[in-house]
Amino acid sequence: MPALVLLGAQWGDEGKGKATDLLGGSVDYVVRYQGGNNAGHTVVVGDQKYALHLLPSGILSPGCTPVIGNGVVVDPSVLFSELSGLNERGVDTSKLLISGNAHIITPYNVTVDKVTERFLGKRKIGTTGRGIGPTYADKINRVGIRVQDLYDESILTQKVEAALDAKNQMLTKLYNRRAIAVGQVVEELLGYADKLAPYVADTVLVLNQALDDDKVVLFEGGQGTLLDIDHGTYPFVTSSNPTAGGACTGAGVGPTKISRVIGILKAYTTRVGAGPFPTELFDEDGEALRRIGGERGVTTGRDRRCGWFDAVIARYATRVNGLTDFFLTKLDVLTGWEQIPVCVAYEIDGKRVEELPYSQSDFHHAKPVYEMLPGWSEDISKAKTFAELPKNAQAYVKALEEMSGAPISAIGVGPGRDETIEINSFL
């Protein structure tokens, strides 16, 4: 049975939550493999709307086991707040598994994130201020706190001391902030140990055994390809690898076990935070996309920057991730435009460029080259098959498929779970 990776093919916010939820009833495990509570997913089930920040979207599917993998960074307070909110709404969260090797977002990580971003001023990256970047930095610097450390007070204390040695120097001498007490942090973290214990597991073993037993495992990325720490628009990126390779390291599953890689594409383009965005709109069209599409960050609450579809970054996502399929979301938002521009290339220093430039400077100066496609005015939210779409909507989807380099196997025509046209099965 397949192991599938599902990830964002743009700058995040493409609708991964809906896609994961759609597949959730057919898979046995859904795994978050990177990021933290900086990756919001909105899932609409019937008349119920769920906003998830840290938990895998599969937690809303009764027969599915949701897993937080070793590559994720976990803020325990956010985790339990989210679990509590779901429990109050009747969602069973008891099957959740959390890797003992996942790193903990500590209170000092959040403090460092906020003060350093503020200190950058005009050069700020646009982080969510939730401590994700500093936690990953601690991980790489080998002073991070893992979930398993909460069950050995001596080791936990030593690790917190090691982490705060340098951070307190920075906080007091550079940022004029008060030093953070080791004992206070240790006490707070130990307070989560008993509550976390029922969920902690050797998830690498669990997932590999599941695949050996022919179970279906779906790996769910947060953020998007263009926010990948290695392959995104650096430095305006996240601190982990949302791309397909990150699923292997972030969940402990070998690449030979991955059978399909599905990229989520919005029918236009959005991004949150700072950084280059060639097709960004600053006019009435941009405002209309934002209003009709409800483009406000699930986690940040910030308005998303909006622009037309960018086929250059879609091709890049196909190449970097080895995408086998696309799930195209929010096609319904484009209803009503007489003509819809699609970016097919860039102009950089007077030259036409059809692939994403590796140079940050070139990408910053890239100007979109548009091809105009005819729009449609018919309501498409009730369409159940591709043939029921207006001819111009069909032509738009086919053009995006050809430009992007992988088949479009599903199309979102509304926010609801059932407002999806499935062209080819993902399973």
Image: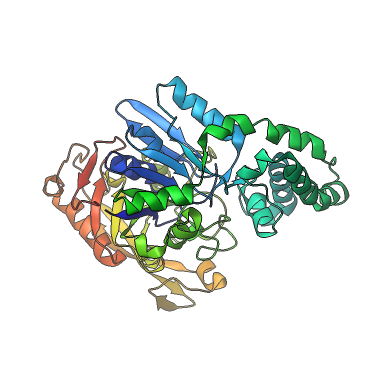
x, y percentage for residue 36?
Answer: 55, 45
Q: Is residue 224 left or right of residue 420?
A: right
Q: Furthest residue to the bottom?
A: 351
x, y percentage for residue 345?
Answer: 37, 70
Q: Reply above or below: 36 against 191.
A: below
Q: Reply above or below: 46 against 131.
A: above
x, y percentage for residue 301?
Answer: 53, 37
x, y percentage for residue 331?
Answer: 28, 47
Q: Using the image as rendered, state which of residue 368 and residue 167 is in the foreground.
A: 167
Q: Furthest residue to the right?
A: 173
Residue visible at 76% across and 50% down in the picture: 163
Find residue 309 and report its image quarter: bottom left
Query: Can residue 129 be seen at all in this image of the molecule?
Result: no
Q: Is residue 70 left or right of residue 320?
A: right
Q: Using the image as rendered, state which of residue 427 and residue 406 is in the foreground.
A: 427
The colour scheme of the drawn protein is rainbow
Residue visible at 42% across and 42% down in the picture: 290
Residue visible at 31% across and 60% down in the picture: 259
Q: Is residue 10 left or right of residue 394?
A: right
Q: Reply above or below: 220 against 229.
A: above
Query: Can residue 224 be seen at all in this image of the molecule?
Result: yes
Q: Using the image as rendered, state which of residue 409 and residue 260 is in the foreground.
A: 260
Q: Is residue 184 left or right of residue 327?
A: right
Q: How many marks?
A: 0
Residue visible at 49% across and 77% down in the picture: 349
